[in-house]
Amino acid sequence: MKLAVAGKGGSGKTSISGTMARLLARDGRKVLAIDGDSSPNLALTLGIPQAQMSAMPTLPRDLLDRSNGGAVLTKTLEEICASHSVQGPDGVTLLVMAHPQHAGTG
Ligand SMILES: Nc1ncnc2c1ncn2[C@@H]1O[C@H](COP(=O)(O)OP(=O)(O)O)[C@@H](O)[C@H]1O
Ligand SMILES: [Mg+2]
């Protein structure tokens, strides 16, 4: 099952995404959470300390091969998760996309 949550800023996307992810993980499902927001704060909702997130490297640009018109991953999802993900207290795996550079809401 893949769920994408998008919408207006401040409408509760992060809160509902984090809550769903934690509940599904507590139920024993394997959950991979990806925060695509340019000001990401899903880690906070998942119970992952900011310092732990900041210590992780962000995804490298050469992860996508665009040479044939499309976009193909140059590594497997397992390899990407091994080097660029953090586990939350309920067992949710959060893929580290970007680090917040400034404080913000929403
Ligand atoms: N169901 C809710 N009731 C009241 N406040 C909420 C609810 N869901 C989220 N909020 C609050 O609204 C604000 C924005 O929520 P957030 O999940 O960060 O939105 P988004 O990710 O869409 O920008 C936060 O302060 C959050 O605590
Ligand atoms: Mg948000």
Image: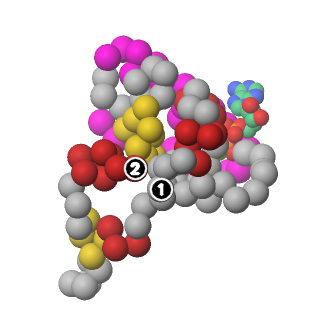
Q: Nearer the viewer, residue 94 or 23?
A: 94
Residue 34 percent location from the top left of the image: 45, 46
Residue 84 - label? 2
- Taking the magenta stretch, the answer to whether it contains residue 4 is yes
Residue 57 - label? 1
Q: Which residues are magenta?
A: 1-28
Find numbered disc 1 in the image and state the secondary structure of the residue it sits on.
loop
Amino acid at pointer 1 = Pro
Residue drawn at x 58%, y 48% as measured from the top left: 54
Whether residue 56 sits left or right of residue 30 in the image: it is right
Residue drawn at x 31%, y 23% as measured from the top left: 29
**Ligand 2 located in image quadrant:** top right
Where the C terminus falls, by quadrant? top right
Whether residue 69 sits left or right of residue 51 in the image: it is left
Q: Note whether 27 is above or below 80 in the view shown.
A: above
Amino acid at pointer 2 = His
Residue 32 percent location from the top left of the image: 37, 38
Residue 105 - label? none
Q: Is mark 1 within 8 Å of ligand 2?
A: no
Q: CA distance from mark 1 to mark 2?
A: 6 Å
Where the N terminus falls, by quadrant? top left
Q: Quadrant of residue 42?
A: top right
**Is residue 24 something one can see in this rendering?**
no
Whether residue 50 sits left or right of residue 2 in the image: it is right
Nearer the N terminus, badge 1 or badge 2? 1
Residue 76 percent location from the top left of the image: 21, 55
- Circles 1 and 2 in contact, beta carbons < 8 Å: yes
